[in-house]
Amino acid sequence: MSAEEYWHGPTRLCESYRKAWEIRRDNQFAREWRAGIYTMHAVGVALDRAFNGEKAKAEYPDAPLYSSEEIRREIEEKRERAAAEAEMKRLDLWAAKVNRMLSGNGGRGEGDRN
């Protein structure tokens, strides 16, 4: 806020500048907090893999933790599609196994007959 605005501007202008500063400050605090959350996720994954090796279960988030409702919906739809595709592949493998068993091979390949 310039001195001219402060001394000769409308009285509510000072309040508006202060409110804008508070909003910018709160946004900065939120950015710093989110950065800390992502850092903690990264450190947790690194420590889990360092101590547990192949048995590590921690994973870094595959999508933003804090985003708009539209982005969250898109992410959820992608996850649902991926889960549905994985389920279809699992069912296809199961159906192929059952078909082999029903065809008389008992689950064996063509060259396994004795």
Image (tube, rainbow, N blue to C red):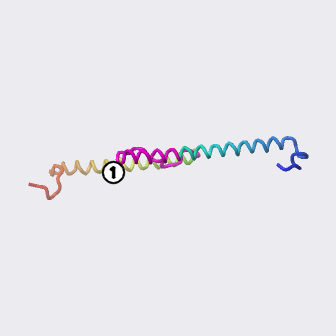
- Could you say whether the residue bearing mark 1 is in a helix, strand or loop? helix
Which residue is identified by label 1? 89
Q: Residue at x 70, y 46 (%)?
A: 24
Outermost residue, left side? 114
Where residue 32 sits in the image (x, y, percent)? 61, 45
Name the one closer to the observer, 99 or 72. Answer: 72
Query: Is 43 positioned to the left or the right of 110 in the image?
Result: right
Name the one closer to the observer, 34 or 73. Answer: 34
Q: What is the magenta range?
A: 39-68
Residue 23: quarter of image:
top right
Outermost residue, right side? 8
Name the one closer to the observer, 58 or 101. Answer: 58
**Total numbered labels placed on residues in the image:** 1
Q: Is residue 30 magenta?
A: no
Query: Is 73 positioned to the left or the right of 45 in the image?
Result: right
Where residue 85 sits in the image (x, y, percent)? 38, 50
Outermost residue, front side? 51
Q: Residues within 10 Å of mark 1 (few under 14, many from 20)?
A: few
Query: Is 68 positioned to the left or the right of 17 in the image?
Result: left
Question: Quadrant where the C terminus lies?
Answer: bottom left
Where residue 14 sits in the image (x, y, percent)? 83, 43
